[in-house]
Amino acid sequence: MDPNLIRNFDHTPPNLPFILHAAEGIDARSAQEIFDLDRMQVLDDRTVLVHGLAMNPKAIALLNRRRSAVIVCPTSNQFLFHCTPSSTSIRSINTVVLGSDSPLTSAGDLLDEIDFARNEIGLDINSLYEMVTAKSANILRLRNGEGQIKPGSIADLIAVRNQGLTPAETVASLTFDNIELVMLGGRVQLVNSSLYARLPDSLKSGLQSLTIDGHLRWLRAPVENLITEARKVLGRDLRLGGKKVDHASAA
């Protein structure tokens, strides 16, 4: 427990979430943390707990009464503890969303978490869709239309090819190579080659080529410099979330 936990909680503005890792384990001490947090009076509707793996039904009931939320990161739990929250446990939490945690311990990215949660834990696609869109935006107290696409929203979005599926079906079956376009705040951050060729020069500025497991994308980041510096420490075989990355011109 952070010795400044109560102070940090008290000084968190009411319009912001209070996020902390808790019950990240499978032992009795981890299970006790939810009750310790409650005694410290830091469980309320702003509190967002990351993991919650050790929570038992009594802890979940307490969490629900306090209207606190949980971000589950199942592939990290699998890697570290050879254990993941069950579908029954996840469904019993009133406010729960899906996260990807660190690539040091997770299977890859958020899409890998969705695949794992669907195929290994058994969560249904409609629940998963809500867990990575509107519900996530709500527990993080985002108020500019994040989590949905509508006129006047902040325009954080991804684009994939239409396969005639519902949005939930599409998200549940996505892999990283399906992502053709990423925008943040209406600004292109990642784009495939065919769309890149159609962009005006003003929108291409700042985009650099990147290959991810052989798939070419253009990314708004100093890719060439980042890869050069990383290779000085890690060598030529660079991987992020298990995927090989390279500057396209050097691939």
Image (spheres, rainbow, N blue to C red):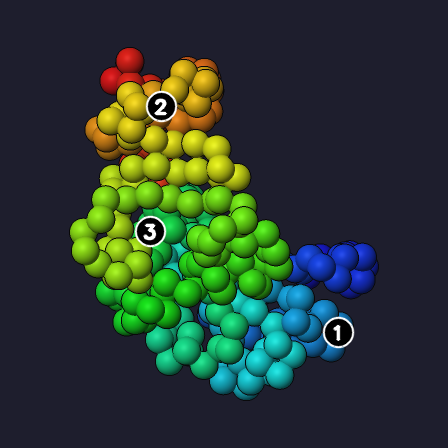
What residue sits 37% from the left and 63% below the top?
129
Among numbered discs 2 and 3, the one appearing first in the sequence: 3
Q: Which residue is mark 3?
A: 111
Among numbered discs 1 and 2, the one appearing first in the sequence: 1
Q: Position of residue 7 (x, y in %)?
A: 81, 59
What residue sits 61% from the left and 72% below the top?
68
- Disc 2 to disc 3, C-alpha distance: 27 Å
Q: Which residue is mark 2?
A: 199
Q: Residue furthest left?
A: 163
Taking depth in this image into account, of 76 and 202 the one nearest to the observer is: 202
Q: Which residue is mark 1?
A: 41
Residue 9 vertical placement versus 211 (above, below): below
Instruction: For marks 1 and 3, give the one nearer the viewer.
Output: 3
Q: Mark 2 falls on what kind of element?
A: loop
What residue sits 21% from the left and 58% below the top?
165
Q: With 226 as the anchor, is 87 left or right in this view?
A: left
Q: Amino acid at mark 3?
A: Leu
Q: Mark 3 falls on what kind of element?
A: helix
Taking depth in this image into account, of 130 and 62 the one nearest to the observer is: 130
